[in-house]
Image (cartoon, rainbow, N blue to C red):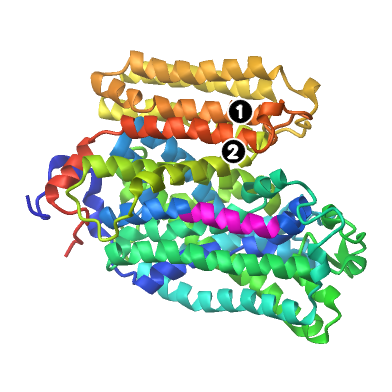
């Protein structure tokens, strides 16, 4: 069958893809990915990393970047075979069907659509302390937990979100060209920051404190990879994937942009961490020498500039070098607006492509796949992405408090990279792969395990948020997607979803692990964990089992392909509680670092091969294979 032939399944799943404009070049895709990588992370992650891990935080950047590179390698092949807008949320549907696809799409939606809000908040948090006092952008005092002042600070973020929206609305070509111009600035300023600090005000003794290079312990070096904004900073590699349906030559350019952006990001961020650590002037900040934890104290400041509010700006002010104090430090303030702004509009576009991809898969109303006739962008999805980002500004949390959960939620969805690679090798061997990953039998599980390690290192407190939010969306599956496809009776679906939603809210409230100020280590503030976990696991398995029991044969088939995913989530969550990344003062000896990580990887390895075995030739991938090409031809 030729590429122009189209089966009904192919038409239902991908008809709207024909309307997208293919206007993004190789440089556009690279700069979109790199522009998302170099954003607010370089402004804040360095101080958080030093505060929690000391000078060994440099190692965290290297390890985090390499792990993300492992994940990117799997997607590099898949993206050349099936270049799609909203790619990351569409691949699981093509390999494991609707239930697995929905869970991962829901997680990715929560993660990607919230990033524009985080970037806008980053601008306020960095620029706010330097703004005129009458603006009141931040509540006082300005610390790592600072929140936006209402209404001035909140309105400032809303204005930025509106700007993000209009940059995307004018089309892919405008977005690509505008971003290329912004990226020149975004690359030059961080590189100059490293060079100026390194040659003018660098203190090598900061890397050899009395307690040692890894003075906080090596478990902290890995703990901060997902929680301090390190992996968050690298997550932008996916932009080349999610804009793939709008690329001129996707099979050549997507893998280049995906891999090159991560490699460049590793170099830039390692240099910046070295510069920040070496640029610390302890006495000027009012912090005892080598007291890295003291950098987060409200009293740590260079004059009126709090270190936590504007880290690199404070280093410049403390240097005593006239050029840095009087001129370049203020370029950093300008960059504190430009870098997050440049990342924010990219992620709002990514959120739009995510919603578009969910609409294509049937998880959201078909209207979400509407493409504008002029610029040919998914305009309804962009509006929805703006609305979701706006919702995430409502809590008005600080950058530091939001980045951990978003990182873990995003990386969780990346477990499918290696799985999809192996499943597609079996179900779609005929499709062309201009980039074919060698030794895929090795790299695919490595990709899965890299994502597993990052999520596990997030720690129990973060995983509690992830699990609560992830399963909160399950009722949507039986209220909309499954009944629409005939996978379950509407009455049964609404009943199952309603009962589970009420029960899950009660269980979450009883556990008191999320949306609470109760210290995680105070046992009296939480129920007995084994009992609470068992109740939670029973609820999730009961919901999934009810979907199977009351489902049609096709609906049961989808559930059977997803048991591995539910088991993987719950097993890693339970393990995290008893590990060095959990809340116990003294974890069991067999679950202390690094043994806890080895157990997490063992669970991950079992679930990886279970997931690969669960993958099958879905109707949608069968229809794509019948066309003879994974590339959707553009509409004339």
**Observer able to see residue 97:** no
- Where does label 1 land, which residue? 575
Instruction: Look at the image and say whether residue 346 sits in the magenta stretch.
Output: no
- Answer with mark 2 or mark 1, whichever residue precedes in sequence: 2
Classify 188 as above or below 431.
below
Query: Which residue is at a point 21% across and 50% down the rendered structure image?
Result: 15
Instruction: Look at the image and say whether residue 59 sits in the magenta stretch.
Output: yes
The reply, left or right, for residue 368 in relation to residue 326 is left
Q: Position of residue 108 (x, y in %)?
A: 47, 44
**In contact (CB < 8 Å): disc 2 and disc 1:** yes
The residue most toward the bottom is 323
Q: Quadrant of residue 204?
A: bottom right
Name the main secondary structure of what is drawn in magenta.
helix
Q: Position of residue 253 (x, y in %)?
A: 33, 67
Q: Position of residue 258 (x, y in %)?
A: 42, 61
Residue sitting nearer the eye, 94 or 448: 448
| SS state under label 1 | helix
Q: Quadrant of residue 331?
A: bottom right
- Where does label 2 land, which residue? 456
Query: Which residue is at a point 64% across and 54% down the rendered structure image?
Result: 229
Which residues are the magenta region?
Answer: 57-69
Q: Position of residue 477 (x, y in %)?
A: 39, 29
The reply, left or right, for residue 121 in relation to residue 466 is right
Residue sitting nearer the eye, 43 or 67: 67
Classify 526 as above or below 338.
above
Query: Which residue is at a point 35% across and 17% down the rendered structure image?
Result: 548
Q: Quadrant of residue 374?
A: bottom left
Q: Dot 1, crowdedness within 10 Å: few (<14), some or many (≥20)?
A: many
């Amino acid at each position: 069958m030729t590429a122009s032939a189209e089966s009904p399944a192919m038409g239902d799943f991908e008809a709207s893809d024909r309307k997208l404009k293919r206007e993004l070049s190789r440089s556009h895709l690279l700069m979109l990915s790199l522009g998302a990588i170099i954003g607010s992370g370089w402004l804040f992650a360095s101080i958080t990393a030093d505060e929690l891990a000391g000078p060994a935080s440099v190692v965290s950047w290297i390890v985090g970047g390499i792990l993300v590179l492992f994940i990117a390698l799997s997607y590099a092949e898949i993206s050349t075979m099936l270049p799609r807008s909203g790619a990351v949320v569409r691949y699981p549907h093509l390999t494991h069907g609707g239930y697995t696809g929905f869970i991962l799409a829901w997680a990715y939606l929560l993660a990607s659509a919230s990033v524009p809000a985080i970037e806008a908040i980053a601008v306020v948090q960095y620029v706010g302390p330097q703004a005129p006092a009458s603006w009141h952008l931040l509540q006082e005092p300005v610390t790592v937990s600072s929140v936006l002042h209402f209404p001035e600070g909140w309105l400032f973020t809303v204005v930025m979100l509106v700007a993000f929206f209009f940059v995307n609305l004018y089309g892919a070509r405008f977005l690509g060209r505008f971003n290329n111009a912004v990226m020149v600035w975004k690359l030059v300023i961080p590189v100059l920051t490293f060079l100026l600090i390194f040659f003018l005000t660098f203190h090598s003794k900061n890397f050899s404190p009395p307690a040692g290079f890894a003075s906080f312990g090596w478990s902290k070096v890995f703990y901060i990879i997902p929680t301090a904004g390190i992996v968050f900073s690298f997550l932008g590699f996916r932009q080349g994937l999610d804009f793939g349906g709008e690329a001129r030559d996707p099979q050549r350019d997507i893998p280049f942009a995906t891999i090159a952006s991560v490699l460049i990001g590793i170099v830039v961020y390692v240099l910046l961490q070295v510069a920040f650590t070496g640029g610390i002037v302890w006495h000027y900040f009012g912090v005892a020498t080598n007291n890295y934890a003291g950098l987060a104290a409200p009293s740590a400041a260079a004059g009126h500039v709090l270190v936590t509010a504007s880290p690199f700006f404070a280093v410049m002010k403390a240097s005593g070098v006239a050029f840095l104090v009087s001129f370049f430090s203020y370029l950093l303030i300008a960059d504190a607006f430009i870098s997050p702004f440049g990342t924010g509009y990219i992620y709002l576009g990514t959120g739009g492509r995510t919603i578009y991809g969910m609409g294509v898969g049937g998880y959201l109303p078909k209207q979400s796949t509407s493409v504008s006739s002029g610029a040919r962008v998914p305009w309804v999805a962009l509006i929805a992405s703006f609305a979701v980002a706006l919702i995430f500004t409502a809590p008005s949390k600080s950058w530091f408090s939001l980045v951990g959960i978003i990182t873990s939620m995003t990386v969780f969805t990346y477990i499918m990279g290696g799985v999809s690679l192996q499943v597609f090798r079996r179900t779609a061997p005929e499709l062309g792969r201009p980039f074919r990953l060698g030794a895929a039998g090795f790299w695919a599980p490595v990709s899965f395990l890299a994502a597993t390690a990052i999520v596990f290192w997030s720690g129990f407190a973060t995983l509690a948020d992830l699990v609560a939010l992830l399963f909160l969306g399950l009722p949507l599956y039986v209220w909309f997607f499954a009944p629409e496809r005939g996978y379950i009776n509407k009455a049964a679906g609404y009943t199952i979803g309603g009962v589970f939603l009420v029960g899950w809210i009660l269980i979450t409230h009883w556990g008191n692990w999320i949306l609470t100020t109760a210290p995680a280590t105070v046992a009296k503030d939480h129920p007995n964990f084994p009992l609470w976990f068992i109740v939670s696991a029973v609820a999730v398995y009961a919901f999934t089992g009810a979907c199977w029991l009351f489902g049609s044969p096709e609906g049961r088939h989808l559930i059977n392909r997803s048991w591995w995913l539910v088991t993987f989530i719950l097993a890693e969550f339970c393990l995290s509680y008893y590990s060095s990344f959990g809340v116990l003062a003294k974890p069991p000896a067999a679950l202390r670092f690094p043994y806890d990580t080895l157990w997490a990887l063992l669970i991950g390895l079992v679930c990886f091969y279970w997931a690969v075995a669960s993958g099958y030739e879905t109707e949608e991938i069968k229809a794509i294979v019948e066309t003879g090409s994974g590339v959707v031809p553009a509409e004339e």
